[in-house]
Structures are given as C-alpha cells and as structure tokens.
Amino acid sequence: MRQPLAPSKKPIYLKKRGDFLKTYKGRSIRRDFFTLFYAKNSFGQTRFGITVPKQVGPAVIRNRYKRWARELFRKKNVVDLGVDFNLLIGSKRMTKADFKKVKGKDFFEKVEEVLSEAFGK
C-alpha cells in the first residue's frame, strides 16, 4: 500500500497507467473537444493527468494542448481537493484541422468552466 503524500503546493501528475485507469471508473464531464475524468483518491491531494491521442494531430499540436493544460492546472490551485483527474483531449466529431484552429483562450474558458462545475472552484 502506498504512503500518503506529504502536503505540497507543487503540482503532482499522474504517471502510472493504473492511476489513469482509475480516473476512467470515476465521473466524467464531456465538452466539445475534451473530456474530464475524475475520481477521489486516498492521498488527500489532487493529482493531474493529460491524455492527447495521435488522432488530435501531429506532435506540435498535441504538445500545445499539454502545455495549455499544465499551465491551467498550475494557475487553478486545486491542490487540496483529494481528487485524481485526467483531461482527455479529443473528439470523434472533430478533425485534425479543427483541433489546429482552437485558440488558447477558448480552451482555457472551456476547461475552467468544467473545473468549476466539477469542483466548485
């Protein structure tokens, strides 16, 4: 059994496959071009994961979404919620060209809307 994590203001990221899979068994909120999966954890601290499949586009586009998501997580300050969440970027309704056209401002607004709906922050 894992030891509880020491409190820290530094972001903690999901790294193991099993941790990502546990988020899929929790709750989810779907929006235009992403889905937020989240589940309670026993650590008392929020952990964050990002999944961007190749169907979204080339590496440049995928890395852009990952950068945006990490930046938003750092700014949002959801460290003390005790939740694991995974932001899955992608939609079967959108093409690679659609993902390329999304602006950072639109992405931030949609994700913040979902985070406030899910966590009330």
Image (cartoon, rainbow, N blue to C red):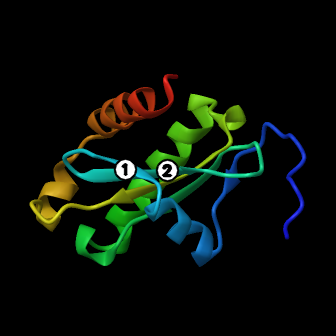
Say which mark, if any, is on residue 107. none
Q: Position of residue 38 (x, y in %)?
A: 49, 50
Depth check: 59 or 90 in front?
Answer: 90
Depth check: 22 or 87 in front?
Answer: 22
Residue at which label 1 appears: 28
Q: Are marks 2 and 1 in contact (CB under 8 Å)?
A: yes
Amino acid type of the residue tagged 1 in the rendering: Ser
Identify the residue at horizontal 51%, vertical 71% (top origin): 21
Residue 81 higher or lower than 54, as above or below: above
* Element at label 2: strand
Identify the residue at horizontal 65%, vertical 69% (top origin): 15
2 or 1: tag closer to the N-terminus? 1
Q: Is residue 94 left or right of residue 85?
A: left
Identify the residue at horizontal 19%, vertical 46% (top origin): 32
Q: What quarter of the picture does the N terminus occupy?
A: bottom right
Say which mark, if any, is on residue 38. 2
* Element at label 1: strand
Q: Position of residue 3 (x, y in %)?
A: 89, 61
- Alpha carbon distance from label 2 to label 1: 6 Å
Residue 60 higher or lower than 103, as above or below: below
Q: Is residue 89 left or right of residue 49?
A: left
Amino acid type of the residue tagged 2 in the rendering: Tyr
